[in-house]
Image: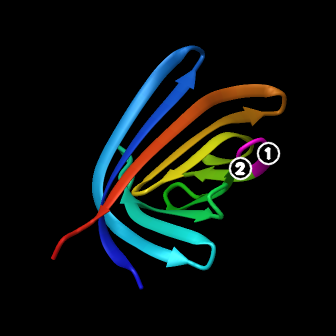
Amino acid sequence: MKEKIDLVVIGNQIVDGESHKTEISTVGTYETTENGFKLEYEDYIEGMSSTTSTIEVTGGTQVDIIREGDICTNMSVCAGERHQCHYVTPYGGILLGVNGDEVKVGNGSLYIKYTLDLNPNILSTNEVNIKFSAIKS
């Protein structure tokens, strides 16, 4: 059963030594799955219509980030592992490498750290810190 939640997503992306922070506060849903949980919310990116983001945590060690809308991707992050994802924007698509550095799951929190690469070149180091709590009726 899906439960309504308040959600704060703080992202930090480091490109060429420069840090770029983003923060969104929104309402979403939380759902328990067989091996973890799933969060879903609308992600608003300036200049684009909304994108639905689904974050599925499996076993406390794997995080799948699925985005559908103007930006589409299905990215897996596992600490110590490299995966590939196809990242599609209104301007075109690109195949990226996703190197998982860290995944931490807490009570009402999720922290993910990973790097994105294109061929042998690291494009960015990314940290995502998510806090969520049930909305009291």
Q: Quadrant of the N terminus?
A: bottom left
| Colour basis | rainbow
Q: Is residue 82 magenta?
A: yes
> Could one spot residue 136 in this view of the protein?
yes
Left or right: 136 in relation to 14: left
Return the x and y of residue 35 as percentages of the image width and height.
63, 73
Q: Which residue is mark 2?
A: 78
- Pick the front one: 124 or 9: 9
Bounds of the magenta span? Answer: 78-84
Give the amino acid at mark 2.
Answer: Cys
In 3D space, how far apart are the residues under numbered discs 1 and 2 (Cα atoms)? 5 Å
Q: Quadrant of the C terminus?
A: bottom left
**Residue sitting at x 72%, y 52%:** 85
Contact (CB < 8 A) between labels 1 and 2?
yes
In the drawing, does residue 8 fall left or right of residue 30?
left
As drawn, 25 above or below 55: above
For disc 1, the neighbor class at 10 Å (few under 14, some 14 to 19, many from 20) is some
